Image (cartoon, coloured by chain):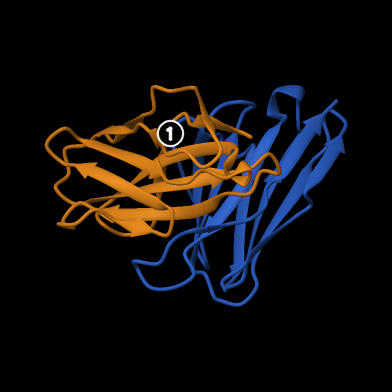
Amino acid sequence: GAVVSQHPSRVICKSGTSVKIECRSLDFQATTMFWYRQFPKQSLMLMATSNEGSKATYEQGVEKDKFLINHASLTLSTLTVTSAHPEDSSFYICSAPPGPYNSPLHFGNGTRLTVT
Amino acid sequence: AQKITQTQPGMFVQEKEAVTLDCTYDTSDPSYGLFWYKQPSSGEMIFLIYQGSYDQQNATEGRYSLNFQKARKSANLVISASQLGDSAMYFCAMSQNTGFQKLVFGTGTRLLVSP
């Protein structure tokens, strides 16, 4: 079945550094991928829509310069948290539709980011 | 704007019993999709079931069924014959149109299945 791979699954970084999270569609092509953020014991909040070959679309309140998204190929989208701060610590999870318009979104396993 | 409300932060059920997880939604769009996802402690999101706004019959997938009451704007998930492995967070979500694209999630319900 359709698989979305996310890497790393867990990362700890120091405040002020940048962290890159990769989201790959392993057996299908994804022109669109979605990045979500989940705080502990809370719901998933959509951060941005990643579009292959064009700029990402960010949700209201999400800082574009803070969360850089690149979707350079049909199988890879990356989220870079720049100049990370402790308040950026969260669970980040990507998703992609594996097929036609009415195909269920498949999610990666998520990345738990801890900024110290 | 679309909104999903899950009023049950936690639910308990005994193994082999059925349980209903509540979900209400709000939207002004005539076309929308409703979803349930399961999130185990490991974090991955597992798709369970989908209901389109124009679907006449309630969706069913194995032990999962979606009780869709359009007039009440509710889309409750019914899990029959609960198993210990069903213990997880359950999220109700909605999409614009009837596609499976960008989703808005509810706050989730933690289900605990006891032996």
Q: Position of residue A10 (x, y in %)?
A: 80, 44
| Drawn side of residue B61 relative to residue A109, left or right | left
Residue found 65% across the figure and 73% down from its top: A26
Q: Residue at x 52, y 40 (%)?
A: A47
Q: Secondary structure at mark 1?
A: loop
Q: For the point 37% across and 42% down, which residue is it? A: B77
The front one of A85 and B106 is: B106
Locate the N terminus of chain A and report the quarter of the image it occupies: bottom right
Q: Residue at x 63, y 55 (%)?
A: A108
Q: Is residue A73 left or right of residue B78?
A: right
Dot 1 corresponds to which residue?
A60
State the blue chain.
A
For label 1, the crowd category at 10 Å Cα-Cα, with few meaning under 14, some 14 to 19 and many 20 or more, is: few
Q: Amino acid at mark 1?
A: Gln
Determine the chain carrying the residue at label 1: A
Chain colored orange: B
Q: Position of residue A54 (x, y in %)?
A: 50, 63
Q: Classify the position of the C terminus of chain A by image quarter.
A: top right
Image quadrant assignment for residue B89: top right
Give the side of residue A100 with respect to residue B9, left or right: left
- Compared with B11, B37 (above or below) is below
